[in-house]
Amino acid sequence: MGEITYQPLRSLIYVDCVKEEYRHKLQHWLYYYHAPESIAKFEPWVTKYAFYNALPTPPQGERFGTYRMQLTEHYWMVNPMSQESLVNSLNEYFPIDAMIWQGTLPENAKEDGFMADGEAARASGGDNGCPPFIFAFLPIFWEQDLKGAGRTMVDGPNYRWQFLVSYPEGHKEDGDQWMMNEILPAFAAMPEVTRMMTSKVKKEINNCHMDRCVEMWFDGPEEWYHCAVENAASFKKPEWAEYDNFPYLRPQFQFASLFLTDIATSDNLKQYRGYLPMR
C-alpha cells in the first residue's frame, strides 16, 4: 500500500424510493443503521456528511429521472476509494432490501439469487435492468459559475434542480459541447433561472457512469416547469437523442435529477443524535 495523500473531494449519492410503501422503511434504515455506521467509519477524514430530503416530483419530472428520497452528500479529505481505505474493522449493515427500496435491484432480487448483501449489489452497477447506483465524485469546488454570482440568502429561498448527465457512448465529447454551448446558455438566458453552476464528474475515482453535474436554482416548481418543459420544447434535438423531448436521454440511467431546498435535513456530523422516535 502507498502513502495516504490529501485529496479533497465532494461526492453525491442519489437515493430513490420506488414505492411509498417503502419510504418509512428506507428512512429507518438510513437513520437507524446507515448514518451512525457511516459516522463511525469515516468521521476522521470527512468534514461534512449530510442528508437532503428530495422535494416532490414536479409535473413531467419523471422524464428527467427524478429521484424521490434524498441526496446524500460527503466532503472527503482523502479518496475513500483508494487501496489504503479498504481495511475496515466492521462491515456496514446493508441488506438487499435497502437496494430494492431504492430501485437499483428488482423486486424479486432475493428470490432470484441476487447477491447476498446490499453492499455488493451497490457496487455491481446497473447490469440488472434497474437504474445503476449513482455515487458521483466532483471537485470540492464548482468548476464553472455560469449565472447568478453574488446571490445571497437575502435574495430568497431557492428551489434547487441538481442533475447528472451521462452522454451516449461515442458522443461523450460532442454531448458535453452540446450541453455547455447550447443547453446551459439557453437556460442562463431565461430570467427564471437565478443561479447556475457546473462541474465534470471525476470519473477516475470510482468509474461513475455519469459525466457532468449541473445545478440550477429557481423561485419554485412553476418557474422550473416553464423553463425545463415549456421553453425547452423549442430546443433542437441532437442527432444522438434517444427520446423526442428534452433532456432526450433515458431517465435515471442517463439523466438523473433531484429537487432540493437550501438546507440539509440532517447535517449528520453536527446534528445526528441517534434514532429518537416520536412519543
Image: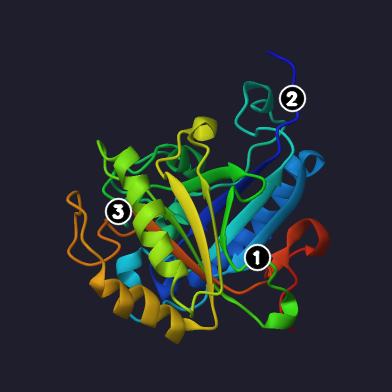
Q: Residue at x 62, y 22 (%)?
A: 83
With respect to residue 183, does 232 lie above or below?
A: below
Do the numbered discs 2 and 3 sit on residues whose CB atoms are within 8 Å?
A: no
> Which of the two discs, 1 and 2, sits closer to the camera?
1
Q: Residue at x 67, y 83 (%)?
A: 156
Q: Secondary structure at mark 1?
A: loop
With respect to residue 157, does 128 lie above or below?
A: above
The x, y position of residue 136, in whole percent, is 52, 45
Quadrant of the rendering where the N terminus is positioned: top right
Residue under pointer 1: 149
Give the mark nearer the N terminus: 1 vs 3.
3
> Which of the two discs, 2 and 3, sits closer to the camera?
2
Do the numbered discs 1 and 2 sit on residues whose CB atoms are within 8 Å?
A: no
Q: Secondary structure at mark 3?
A: loop
Would residue 118 appear left or right of 35 to someone viewing this image? left
Residue 140 location, quadrant: top right
Q: Residue at x 68, y 25 (%)?
A: 87
Its colouring scheme is rainbow
Q: Residue at x 67, y 28 (%)?
A: 85
